[in-house]
Image (cartoon, rainbow, N blue to C red):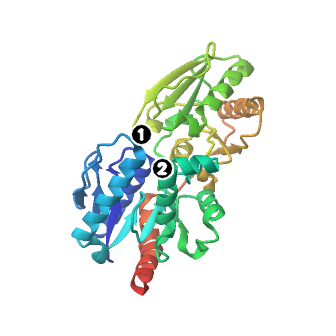
């Protein structure tokens, strides 16, 4: 197997995309694949067997200028170290060249023709995304869910053949918790709800808090909401609703018992937290815009965002009561990082090598 060069700005287990890269690298190393990393920053400890190439970060505070600088320095490094010739370039960012690219986040969207004309930021992100996906007619595009694949074809279908697209779900932590359902009825006078994610607006946390307020009224019990991973944000005052900003909590699903997860995301290509909750025997109500619904395991319920807050709250009441009574069934999601590595080794990388050598 040829060696692989991963391109990611931050290397380490510190978020959705970064954890995907970090854990995939670990699984590849375990089976003897030589892996290089081209990155601006090593966030935490490495596996110890990968080769790390650190590039200098931009001093600009503008995100698009940072990315523009990063892709240039990455390209220089790849050429200087002859990585392009000797390895499969697997990008997780917006590079000038790739053999494989994994699309983790939502596609770039903007409104208004005039905004595009007068905004160098918009023009850059549009061009960078298009180059990442279409710059090489021989590269392989990996999406993290069927939903993300559908969105990709909707935007680029005329230029991007389906034969170049492969779905590669993130690995899901195995179910290691039994205590979440040891006592189905609450041991204290209240309901504990969790919402997880860094981008609170895209994850729909404002909508989720409104659901919790109605849930509290319908149940007649205090609702305690833990918000994990996001900074504090301005939200309407919810009298009597306990809202706790927890910051980033590693392995959050092992830390506390929750009666319900809400994930009313507006755009969510995957949603690892949904799978983590499902395997921790925490029931989940999410929007139908969540890619993790591919698994249809755990206890996942999806609802359209067009439904009223009242209907979401009614469903939440039903699920919480069923959870307390022990009437919910939980099926473990059995897809891990070793499975993802095998998918890359058996299908994605061979396809990329075939296209690279036939170019």
Q: Nearer the viewer, residue 150 or 80?
A: 80
- Identify residue for label 1: 251
In the rendered image, which quarter is residue 350 located in?
bottom left
Q: Nearer the viewer, residue 132 or 223?
A: 132
Q: List the single residue furthest toward the bottom.
A: 358
Q: Tell me where residue 196 appears, x and y as whole percent.
A: 52, 36
Assign the N terminus to one quadrant of the image.
bottom left
Q: Is residue 238 above or below residue 258?
A: above
Q: Nearer the viewer, mark 1 or mark 2?
A: 2
Calculate the distance from the C-alpha at mark 1 to the C-alpha at mark 2. 39 Å
Q: Is residue 57 above or below residue 5?
A: above
Instruction: Give left or right: position of 287 versus 170.
Output: right
Secondary structure under tag 1 reads: loop
Q: Which mark is residue 120?
A: 2
Q: Nearer the viewer, residue 299 or 234?
A: 234
Assign the C terminus to one quadrant of the image.
bottom left
- Using a 10 Å C-alpha cutoff, classify the residue at mark 1 as few (fewer than 14 neighbours), some (14 to 19) or many (20 or more): few
Q: At 60% from the left edge and 72% from the top edge, which residue is drawn?
A: 159
In the rendered image, which quarter is residue 326 located in?
top right
One can see residue 175 in this view: yes
Q: Tell me where residue 188 appears, x and y as whole percent.
A: 57, 18
In the rendered image, which quarter is residue 191 located in?
top right
């Amino acid at each position: 197997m040829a060696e692989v060069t991963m391109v990611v700005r931050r290397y380490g287990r510190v978020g959705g995309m970064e954890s995907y890269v970090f854990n995939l690298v670990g699984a590849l190393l375990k089976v003897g694949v030589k892996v290089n990393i081209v990155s601006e920053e090593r966030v935490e400890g490495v596996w110890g067997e990968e080769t790390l190439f650190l590039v200098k970060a931009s001093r600009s505070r503008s995100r698009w200028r940072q990315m523009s600088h990063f892709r240039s320095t990455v390209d220089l490094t790849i050429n200087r170290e002859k990585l392009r010739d000797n390895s499969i370039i697997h990008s997780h960012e917006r590079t000038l060249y790739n053999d494989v690219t994994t699309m983790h986040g939502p596609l770039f969207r903007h409104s208004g023709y005039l905004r595009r004309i007068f905004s160098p930021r918009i023009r850059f992100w549009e061009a960078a995304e298009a180059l990442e996906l279409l710059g090489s007619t021989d590269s392989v595009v990996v999406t993290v869910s069927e939903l993300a694949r559908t969105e990709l074809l909707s935007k680029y279908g005329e230029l991007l053949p389906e034969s170049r697209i492969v779905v590669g779900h993130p690995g899901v932590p195995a179910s290691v918790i039994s205590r979440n359902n040891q006592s189905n009825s609450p041991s204290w006078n209240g309901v504990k709800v969790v919402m997880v994610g860094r981008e609170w607006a895209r994850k729909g946390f404002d909508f989720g808090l409104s659901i919790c307020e109605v849930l509290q009224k319908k149940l007649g019990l205090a609702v305690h909401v833990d918000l994990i991973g996001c900074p504090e944000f301005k939200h309407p005052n919810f009298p009597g609703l306990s809202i706790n900003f927890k910051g980033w909590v590693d392995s959050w699903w092992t830390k506390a018992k929750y009666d319900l997860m809400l994930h009313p995301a507006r755009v969510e290509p995957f949603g690892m937290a949904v799978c983590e909750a499902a395997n921790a025997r925490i029931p989940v109500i999410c929007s139908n815009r969540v890619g993790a619904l591919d698994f249809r395991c755990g206890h996942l319920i999806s609802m359209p965002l067009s439904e009223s807050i009242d209907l979401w709250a009614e469903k939440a009441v039903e699920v919480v009561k069923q959870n307390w009574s022990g009437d919910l069934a939980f099926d473990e999601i059995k897809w891990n990082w070793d499975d993802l590595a095998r998918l890359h080794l058996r299908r994605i990388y061979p396809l990329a090598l075939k296209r690279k050598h036939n170019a």
